[in-house]
Amino acid sequence: MSVLLVDTDVVSFLFKQDSRAESYATILQGNQLALSFMTVAEPFQWAAIRKWGESRTSQLERSLTNYLIIPVDVELCRCWGNLRAELQIIGKQISAQDAWIAATAIRHNLPLVSHNAKDFSGIPALEVRTCS
């Protein structure tokens, strides 16, 4: 069994039981699924913006227990800073959120499963797996 880092978009598909989640079943099945702390934070932001009730927020919290959650540490912060700097130097834009997710994958040498592979293109040392 391998550990795969799952991007926020794929986690969202799984949580909402979106039909796009089915296309990721073969990639995800039989592996330990991990999330960056950022991927945990983003759905809580959506919940606050969309004013989810207690029941739906609790459902989200329960679904997150199915994943290994990777916390932030000093080395991850260093990796994020270096990644953002390297991309800025070559003129490539990446959101802070995507940079945290990419840095988590790089820091822990994990493949990233994302539906938005283009957001992570051109990042050295990052393996992206997708179905899109």
Image (cartoon, rainbow, N blue to C red):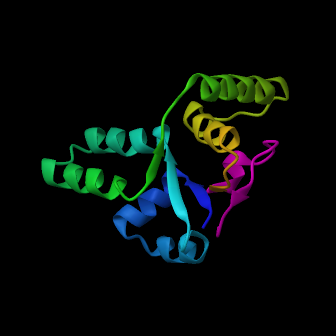
Q: Which residue is painted at 68% across and 55% down in the image?
A: 111
Outermost residue, left direction? 54
Q: Is residue 64 above or below residue 71?
A: below
Horizontally, residue 19 falls left or right of residue 90, namely left
* Location of residue 126 in the rendering, given as x and y in whole percent from the top left corner: 75, 47
The extreme front residue here reads: 1
Q: Is residue 90 left or right of residue 3?
A: right
Residue 115 can be seen, yes or no: no
Q: Which residues are magenta?
A: 113-132
Residue occupying image coordinates x 20% and y 51%: 58
Tell me the quadrant of the picture where the C terminus can be found.
bottom right
Residue in the picture at 54% in, 73% down: 30
Q: Quadrant of residue 116?
A: bottom right
In percent of width and height, residue 49 lies at: 29, 39
The location of residue 22, given as percent across then percent down, is 50, 77
Q: Check residue 94 for magenta coloring.
A: no
Residue 71 lies, in percent from the top left, at: 48, 35
Quadrant hosting residue 102: top right
Q: Is residue 126 magenta?
A: yes
**Viewer-proximal residue among 51 and 41:** 41
From what the image shows, is residue 82 above or below residue 42?
above
Q: Is residue 12 visible?
A: yes
Q: Main secondary structure of the magenta part?
A: loop
Whether residue 98 sits left or right of residue 111 in the image: it is left
